[in-house]
Image: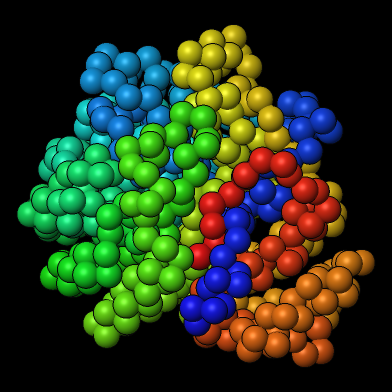
Amino acid sequence: MCSLIQKYNVPGPRYTSYPTVPHWDIDTFSGKTWKATVKKSFDESNASEGISLYIHLPYCESMCTFCGCHKRITKRHDVETPYIRSVLKEWELYCNLFSEKPKIKELHLGGGTPTFFSPNNLKYLINGIFKRATKAEAYEFSFEGHPNNTTKDHLQALFDVGFRRVSFGVQDYNETVQKAIHRVQPFEKVKEVTEVAREIGYTSVGHDIIFGLPHQTLRHVEETILKTKELMPDRLAFYSYAHVPWLKGNGQRGYKDDDLPSAEQKRRQYERGKELLTQVGYHEIGMDHFALPSDSLFQATQSGTLHRNFMGYTATKTQLMVGLGASSISDSWYSFAQNVKSIEEYAHLVENDIIPIYRGHILTEEDRVIRKHILNLMCGFETSWEQPEMYFDEINEVVQALEEMRNDGLITITKGRLQVFENGRPFIRNICMAFDLHLRRKTSKTRLFSMTI
């Protein structure tokens, strides 16, 4: 395995979208076209499946140095209400495009730190959203909670407006690692918020754990997993630290590259963590996720409805996903659009009745076919081009590019069908890269992605 890690450990996307953001064709994109695709997608899908809504809440009181998200560091909480008003105004601009009241199937609050906002303000935000929307059947509402500042009042307020899933960012329980990433939180605090969430009635409590962090050892990962077993969260995101310090606004500068585990050490951390998790009943879901059989993510895997979008893996698929807030990304299936990143510019645009996007991509027919293949691989570890609608002209070149992985015993390709073996799953990003025609056609002089392993 070590030789394969050395061989395939190259920079590559995580494929929350295809095409990936660096390969968007911004020259052919326009706000007018974006709004037209939103209307089209809404009319095609709202009645049957509803829509998804992602709301970006960018504020944090302190900088976590492992984080690559768009955020604003401040201890001033008077920013909450003006920002919420801007988000609700943006939602109004989208609702004006719709032919009927949207049915929200999935709603997620991300950040930043959503629990930076007060319980009352979070409730005000959600109630404002539903002045113009209804809840779809079997909806799923979730939020990201910081264990250090998520209170019982936060959990209760969001439960009262329909939230039943929460994920807490744990990362690692070792104090040396926590200090390096500027995220010090004791196990007792995580235990407290996990138990309070369950007492209130949350049906899915998740923990996020990262391997490959600065100063992190195999023993640290083992200790973190053993503590996690005491709480048995319903699902786990157990993923590789993405080292991208060159990105603007990134806080990944509190340590040296030499402080990071090697690719081989990272893979041992993952394999040992996976071993410990599977021993107590967790099942691996897609890439870097685990869930108990009772969780909706596992059930979606069993039923073949697992989906992946800009929010990561989800148990439900909707054709239209609207992203609200500064830097949010939206997906109409026919196109992508990203909001401006500056909070001040964002507020100014929505106040002037302008949907605050600044770049995007209109998917070609080829894009949509490739996107389906990558979704199939990321969610089910197999795909097929036997049917005419899944065939594309360069498929033979893709198969040729995968020949070495087939020779290494990671995949099989027979009669227009590709399947990934168990030992090939750690390399799923590399397999998807063979299908990524934009990546293969365009070379970049600058580093764009984190390493795949």
Q: How is the image coloured?
A: rainbow
Viewer-proximal residue, 352 or 147? 147
Query: Residue at horizontal 61%, vertical 57%?
Result: 12
Viewer-proximal residue, 387 or 61? 61
Viewer-proximal residue, 262 or 126? 262
Residue 171 sits above or below residue 126 on the image: below
- Picture mark count: 0
Residue 31 sits above or below residue 143 on the image: above
Q: Where residue 130 sits: x, y (%)?
A: 42, 34
Residue 245 in view: yes
Q: Where residue 110 sits: x, y (%)?
A: 40, 41
Query: Residue at horizontal 22%, vertical 65%?
Result: 220
Query: Residue at horizontal 28%, vertical 50%?
Result: 169
Q: Where residue 29 sits: x, y (%)?
A: 79, 32
Residue 298 in view: no
Q: Quadrant of residue 61?
A: top left
Q: Residue furthest right?
A: 393
Locate residue 59 relative to residue 50 in the image: left or right.
Answer: left
Viewer-proximal residue, 404 or 196? 404
Locate residue 310 relative to residue 225 in the image: left or right.
Answer: right
Q: Where residue 55 sits: x, y (%)?
A: 45, 36
Locate residue 87 relative to residue 44 in the image: left or right.
Answer: left
Q: Quadrant of residue 182?
A: top left
Locate residue 361 relative to residue 128 in the image: left or right.
Answer: right
Query: Residue at horizontal 60%, vertical 70%?
Result: 8
Residue 156 sits above or below residue 59 on the image: below
